[in-house]
Image (spheres, rainbow, N blue to C red):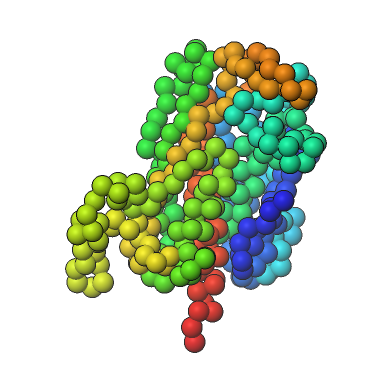
């Protein structure tokens, strides 16, 4: 099911939205890295819903089960779990044989012939807490090397207006990586931008990504798009987004990702049923009106996982 991510810094995530717990196992983290529960909890807190989101509110308190002793990583697998304590599974009973519009209900059933209908199970947005927990560890590795990953929402939502309308909104997140060294990434199939794109697109609700000038490059001339160099291996522009030929240039790595509107809305919608019919439904329960603010730390986490992996890989690139 492709629940493992990474080459050297490898992360396995597990758990369902309405199961007992969710979490991750991190293998390949070097020994001696200072790591505390607060490092993980601070990132998970950023992913939690705000007071106006309307979505399921959990404390998201992490537990470290293995791989850390006296505040430092041991070099052995690090297991982190977060227990689910605020599930309302009955909210989904009436949807057991209905495929919610815009969700993975139909495609999951088409692939496996069986699914956990309670909140989407493994395809729930709650799965992202596993990524954020693992990303917190990756961020610690990057920080030791002076690398910083920071994302922000470029669009904002009028939450109360959308709530009154029973609708939702999407948006765009921009991520910037500073102080990444030149030389990260592989030149053919494992390009840095290809790995970042795969990582970010794997986040539920993400539907597109662009680096540097992105799609605007289609309207530019080569003389405009080529970044202009200056002294000390610097550039006056960054249309490449900090990556050329799949390898980091030493400039800031910059990309933008687009997220679709939350598919769970309370407006009446047509939905396909398991027996092949179509009926009108209204989805009730606790759902984000706009997923973008909570997706910001998830984008940072996936970016950090890719960079930590490539940073460790780079140490075996040359003598």
Where residue 318 sits: x, y (%)?
A: 48, 83
Q: Residue at x 37, y 37 (%)?
A: 154
* Image side of residue 259 versus residue 233, left or right: right
In this rendering, the count of numbered labels is 0
Where residue 109 sits: x, y (%)?
A: 74, 35
Does residue 29 show up?
A: no
Where residue 42 sits: x, y (%)?
A: 55, 46
In the picture as drawn, the residue positioned furthest to the bottom comes out as: 319
Q: Residue at x 68, y 22 (%)?
A: 272
Q: Nearer the viewer, residue 48 or 200?
A: 200
Q: Nearer the viewer, residue 85 or 288?
A: 288
* Image side of residue 275 versus residue 164, left or right: right
Name which quarter of the figure residue 84 lies in: top right
Name which quarter of the figure residue 309 lies in: bottom right
In the picture as drawn, the residue positioned furthest to the front comes out as: 276
Q: Nearer the viewer, residue 63 or 7?
A: 7
Where residue 201 sits: x, y (%)?
A: 53, 47
Q: Nearer the viewer, residue 105 or 55?
A: 105
Does residue 204 show up?
A: yes
Q: Compared with residue 43, is residue 233 higher up or lower down, i.e. above or below?
A: below
* Image side of residue 194 versus residue 100, left or right: left
Q: Compared with residue 100, is residue 135 higher up or lower down, i.e. above or below?
A: below
Q: Residue at x 79, y 37 (%)?
A: 113
Q: Residue at x 23, y 73 (%)?
A: 232
Q: Compared with residue 126, is residue 11 higher up or lower down, i.e. above or below?
A: below
* Image side of residue 59 versus residue 84, left or right: left
């Amino acid at each position: 099911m492709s629940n493992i991510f990474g080459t050297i810094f490898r992360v396995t995530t597990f758990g369902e939205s309405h199961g007992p717990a969710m979490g991750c196992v991190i293998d390949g983290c070097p020994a001696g890295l200072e790591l505390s529960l607060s490092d993980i909890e601070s990132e998970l807190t950023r992913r939690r819903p705000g007071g106006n989101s309307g979505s399921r509110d959990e404390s998201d308190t992490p537990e470290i089960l293995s791989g850390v002793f006296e505040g430092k990583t041991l070099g052995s697998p690090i297991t982190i779990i977060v227990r689910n304590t605020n599930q309302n599974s009955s909210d989904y009973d009436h949807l057991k044989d209905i495929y919610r519009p815009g969700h993975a209900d139909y495609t999951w059933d088409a692939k496996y012939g069986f699914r956990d209908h309670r909140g989407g199970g493994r395809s729930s947005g709650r799965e992202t807490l596993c990524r954020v927990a693992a990303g917190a560890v990756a961020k610690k590795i990057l920080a030791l090397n002076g690398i910083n990953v920071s994302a922000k929402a470029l669009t904002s939502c009028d939450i109360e207006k959308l709530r009154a309308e029973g609708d939702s909104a999407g948006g765009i997140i921009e991520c910037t990586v500073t102080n990444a060294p030149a030389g990260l990434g592989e030149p053919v199939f494992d390009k840095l931008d290809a790995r970042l794109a795969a990582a970010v697109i794997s986040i539920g609700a993400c539907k597109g990504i662009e680096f540097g000038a992105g799609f605007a490059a289609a309207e530019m001339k080569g003389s405009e798009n080529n970044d202009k160099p200056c002294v000390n291996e610097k550039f006056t522009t960054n249309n490449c987004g900090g990556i050329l030929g799949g390898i980091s240039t030493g400039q800031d790595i910059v990309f933008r990702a687009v997220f679709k509107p939350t598919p769970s809305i309370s407006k009446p919608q047509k939905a396909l049923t398991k027996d092949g019919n179509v009926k009108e439904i209204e989805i009730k329960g606790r759902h984000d009106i706009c997923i973008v603010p909570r997706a910001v730390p998830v984008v940072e986490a996936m970016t950090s996982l890719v960079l930590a992996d490539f940073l460790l890989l780079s140490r075996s690139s040359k003598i």
